[in-house]
Image (cartoon, helix red, strand yellow):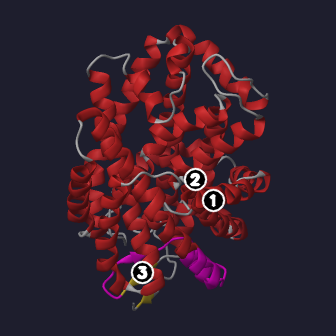
Amino acid sequence: MIDIIHDAIRAVNDVVWGWPMLILLVGTHIFLTFRLRFVQRYTFKALKLAVTKDKGAPGDVSQFGALSTALAATLGTGNIVGVAMAIYLGGPGAIFWLWIVGFFGIATKYSEGLLAVKYRVQTSNGTMLGGPMYALERGLKMKWLGILFAIFCSLASFGIGNMVQVNAISVMMESQFNINTHITGIVLFIITFAVIVGGIKSIAKVSEKIVPTYAVIFILMNIFVICLNIAYVPEALTLIVKSAFTPRAAGGGFVASTLLMAMRYGVARGLFSNESGLGSAPLAAAAAVTRNPVRQALVSMSAVFLDTIIMCFLTGLMLVTTILKNPAGYENLKGGEFVAFAYNQIPVVGPIILTVGIFLFAWTTVLGWCYYAERTMEYLFGKKCILPFRILFSIVAYIGAVIPLVVVWDAADMFNAFMAIPNLITLLLLSGAIVRETKKYLWDKNLDAVSTDELPTIYN
């Protein structure tokens, strides 16, 4: 039965991740980049705003808190195992496409953050709600499509945002420390529920402490391994670019790959990593304390720069240089085994940092995705569903830790595509509003102005 389900999912992925989806996703990234006059050039201004507080502005958490929550949801196995799987399945050229998706995806993430704040609403107790479903409902009068997005996001949260992550933790804990998966599952159930029961403020507080600190450590470790392989960096960079455009036969430590395979897995893992175009991160951006939509949009786009342009690229370069240095050692290795082999070049310290990193990144991803799903579940069923959902989400964390996940990675890619389609429609049809807001606040240098947009109150 599992094989039948897996084959069906793969068949769906062959359709949804074919050329039409690649063109729609990457095309939206490029279209918005040019319409917004390469908003990527404001990246350093965005990083500065991320650590600046907007005192007195409406919102539930600071801009940095919202950014940390979004990073918590994206900095997970996608940055470690996902990059390794992209290389394994699509060859080194997948790293080029992953990076391209990240660069142009900055404009998409900016646009998502802008719409999240512009069309957000507040509940009767002042809680901020926003995301693609509200932009679809309020901006395009397409509530039915907003409902579909909310359904797909809710379903995806149990796979991409929960089971994939906790299974990576439990497998690692069993292989490295011989800890029974049931014990890991119980611990994950307890600590996950203890945090998510406090909602966005609790999740943001934990994310602010863990994510920035360990992201810096992980970046430094990748740079250190690259330095150990420094002689192979020129060859690795050349190989990444050449393999992105030409088929590569098997050999030299790499599996056979084609142009479509390199693009498919590079784009898919790029989306899995930074979620640009997916529509999930705006759910956290809508909660930010911010004076106007553009300020939070800039903060939101900085997540892609940190996540993909920096971290994923360094991880990919580290892996490719290590493969070139030790081609025989990589035979029959894939996923997390790839990364473990690379980090083992640093005795004792390397494996420990990798183990702790996978645990923290994967767990904080679970926390961030729980918040995303809460918002979509609340949109569908009202706030009465929140506590039952938190309990169920924590139970699924236990289940994901103790069962083998044969189909979850492919299922995660499938639900990513299902979420992305209505979100990309939103971005394209509301691109005029995105440009107008950008001109008003950014291009006309009114970034400190306070928005006068209507903030409707809903009773749910």
Magenta residues, start to end: 124-148
| Number of numbered discs overlaid on the protein picture | 3
Q: Nearer the viewer, residue 240 or 99?
A: 240
**Residue carrying label 1:** 9
At a point 39% along the width and 73% down the height, the residue shown is 374
Quick one: label 3, few (<14), some, or many (20+) residues within 10 Å? some
Quadrant assignment, res 129: bottom left
Picture coordinates of residue 323 (x, y %)? 54, 18
Quick one: label 1, few (<14), some, or many (20+) residues within 10 Å? some
Horizontally, residue 35 falls left or right of residue 395, namely right
**Residue carrying label 3:** 378
Q: Are marks 1 and 2 in contact (CB under 8 Å)?
A: yes
Residue 410's mark?
Answer: 2
**134 drawn magenta:** yes
Q: Is residue 256 above or below residue 192?
A: above
Horizontally, residue 354 falls left or right of residue 18, namely left
At a point 65% along the width and 30% down the height, the residue shown is 91
**369 drawn magenta:** no
